[in-house]
Amino acid sequence: QGGMANTAVPTASGANLTWTAPAHWKAERASAMRKGTYLIAGEGTSEAELSITAFPGDVGGEVANLNRWRGQISLAPLAEGEVAAAVTRIKQGGLDLTVVDFTGTGASPQRILGAMVPFGGATWFFKLMGSVPDVESVEKDYDKFLLGAKRLAKSNKEKFGSEAVKTILNNLLDKYVPKFDQLEEQAALPQMVTLNLPKLNKIELPALKKAE
């Protein structure tokens, strides 16, 4: 009894996504389960809630996750063959988004605008949920927010390592080996030289003989 409530659920760690929320959205404190939560004023005094979570792997797969959302608003599950017609796939900001719009049934139906985003070995979930009028009133802001989500910028150290070094090496090759594919012998690669470059540890590169 109470087993599920006491079961630890692993959350994603490592690389993160970043986003910019409208100023009038009320940010709630993040928790172990959530990367972000926003309460968004809707019609009258009610609010819609946007939750952002991330879990390792595919968390059971696309169909299972879509049906989990559908179950939250009393909709029947989708069969695998029905998924293609129920989702919209978007490429934006270097990310692949699977976007859905589900409206429940009943006297006071709930609506979910959701997106699943695989990133960094995890699946990120963006779920806006509330009454049909509340979600409709914030839909445009949500769309802009979602399409603005992007990979967290690399640190200066990462940028230096991946970009500056590559530029230096390419410049060396351009200078000393304009016709590298025409070199016939490894003899064109004599002794090693040591380069002292600012902000870099010493790296050793072959002293390349300019092609004849």
Image (tube, grey):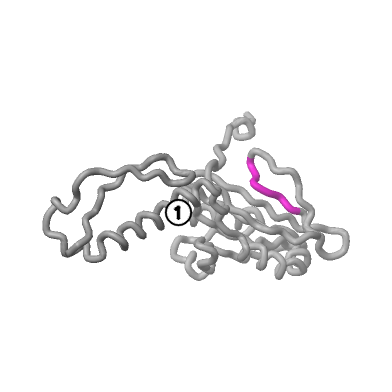
Label 1: element kind: helix
Q: Does 41 sit left or right of 120 as displayed?
A: right
Q: Position of residue 112 (x, y in %)?
A: 66, 61
Residue 58 is at least partly visible in this image = no
Which quadrant does the N terminus fall into? top right
Write down the quadrant of residue 11 in the picture.
top right
User: Outermost residue, right direction?
Assistant: 45
Q: Is residue 124 rendered magenta in the image?
A: no
Which quadrant does the C terminus fall into? bottom left
Q: Does 113 sit left or right of 199 as displayed?
A: right
The residue singled out by tag 1 in the image is 164
Q: Is residue 35 rendered magenta in the image?
A: yes
* Dot 1 alpha-carbon crowd within 10 angstroms: few under 14, some 14 to 19, many 20 or more: few
Which residue is at the front of the view, 19 or 106? 19
Residue 95 is at least partly visible in this image = yes
Q: Does 167 sit left or right of 49 as displayed?
A: left
Residue at the image position 25 percent from the left and 43 percent from the top: 192
Q: Position of residue 75 (x, y in %)?
A: 62, 60
Q: Position of residue 68 (x, y in %)?
A: 58, 52
Write down the quadrant of residue 116 in the picture.
bottom right
Number of numbered labels in the structure image? 1
Residue at the image position 44 percent from the left and 65 percent from the top: 81
Q: Position of residue 30 (x, y in %)?
A: 70, 43
Which residue is at the front of the view, 119 or 109? 119
Q: Residue type at mark 1?
A: Ala
**Magenta extent:** 33-38
Residue at the image position 52 percent from the left and 51 percent from the top: 123
Residue at the image position 54 percent from the left and 42 percent from the top: 12
